Image: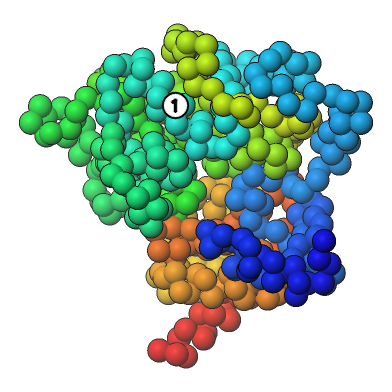
Amino acid sequence: MPTDKSAQKAVFERRESEARSYCRNFDTVFTSATGSEMTDSDGRTYIDFLAGCSSLNYGHNDPDMKAALIDHISNDGISHGLDMYTDSKAAFLTAFEEKILKPRNMDHKVMMTGPTGTNAVEAAMKLARKVTGRTNIIAFTNGFHGMTMGALAATGNSGKRAGGGMPLQGITRMPYEGALGEDVDTLSIIETMLSNDSSGIDAPAAFLLEPVQGEGGLNAASAEWMRGIARIAKQHGALLIVDDIQAGTGRTGTFFSFEEMGIEPDLIPMAKSLSGMGLPFAALLLKPELDIWKPAEHNGTFRGNTHAFVTARVAIEKFWSDDSFQKEIATKAGILTEAMHALAKEIPGAKLKGRGMMQGVDVGSGELAGAICAECFRNGLIIETSGADDEVVKVLAPLTTPVETFRSGLKILLEAAASQSTNKIAAE
């Protein structure tokens, strides 16, 4: 195994597909990570404001999750069980039922899908079509739901869609809140289009949306708009699919991103931080009356990750047994909002985006956002962009980040924004 950094980089260049992406912006070899920090082969430590694209909401290598997983493996616990009954699955489902579902008056069943979010979305789309007997699904501008063909059809980004290599079908695109300007009522447009028998839009099986569009630029829907979509869906006999893959598991302040919006989604795809420790794990929550699957009608070799059951249970018991963690998230979200206001002041025309611990700033161009993130990396902070043109500087710090570390990372970000904004003005 190569230990020299140049040899390691050489093998990536020689053997890894051109599809690799994040590594192009973070050109170093990482060797370890703890909490909210990552260390590379040169011994340099970086503050992590990417968190595995919100797959590490509880940080890197949480000690309690790690200890439980090591104990499970050391005692020859089941490592792979297809969808057979195991003690670790029972423990996870019990914790999820008692700590997450019951306190929120939710009676959803849990469907184990393939290990990534796109599979949970595929399952939701398939089930909506199976339940309603319809094929059309309403998705939204700037939405991102995955890279497999059904989920990709519902994804708005043209670059991602081009990778499909064939026509993407079964979706009607509607404007997300604010997509046509702040003064345009997109709910009214959607309602008018669906109520017009000559609009050319087939009756939908479901509406598929993210309460905060993670990859689409941190567009955050209001509770009023979400309730409007839920009402329209019910009026037209369609199901409501709320994709909580990136915005959920505490990222926006509550376990589910829609908790305080007054809606009851029929189907909820989940993934990313569901495992608690960055392990591949996705699931679809579905109302019991919709569970009309035949055995193995949507199966997969890795539906349910037994190791992830172990860490997910610990995460639920550790962080969601009471409201203390939720209060901690709210405190940090306030710190983040203050910092984003300060960042926006550095750049003419900049706009705040997102909510909770899923916030950022639209700086007006992908070039400037990229320059800010590159400057951050040079100064010890890992952070990425978002949006149709990568124009949003996006903060996805672990929710467990110590306040002092959080403020240090935000300081690096603000200094980088000030520096790059000055450079941009000088160049003009």
* SS assignment at label 1: helix
Residue 195 at what x, y percent from top left? 15, 27
In percent of width and height, residue 210 lies at: 44, 39
**Where residue 161 sits: x, y (%)?**
36, 50
Q: Amino acid at mark 1?
A: Ala
Q: Is 25 placed above or below 85 here?
A: below
Q: Quadrant of the N terminus?
A: bottom right
Taking depth in this image into account, of 18 and 34 the one nearest to the observer is 18
Vertical placement of residue 133 versus 19, above or below: above
Q: Which residue is the site of mark 1?
A: 124
Residue at image location 40% in from the left, 63% down from the top: 389
Q: Residue at x 61, y 40 (%)?
A: 272
**Residue visible at 57% across and 78% down in the picture:** 418
Q: Nearer the viewer, residue 189 or 18?
A: 18
Please determine whether, in this image, residue 19 is positioned above or below residue 214.
Answer: below
Residue at the image position 59 percent from the left and 57 percent from the top: 395
Q: Quadrant of residue 151?
A: top left
The local crowd at label 1, few if under 14, some if 14 to 19, many if 20 or more residues have their Cα within 10 Å, is many
| Residue 323 appearing in the image | no
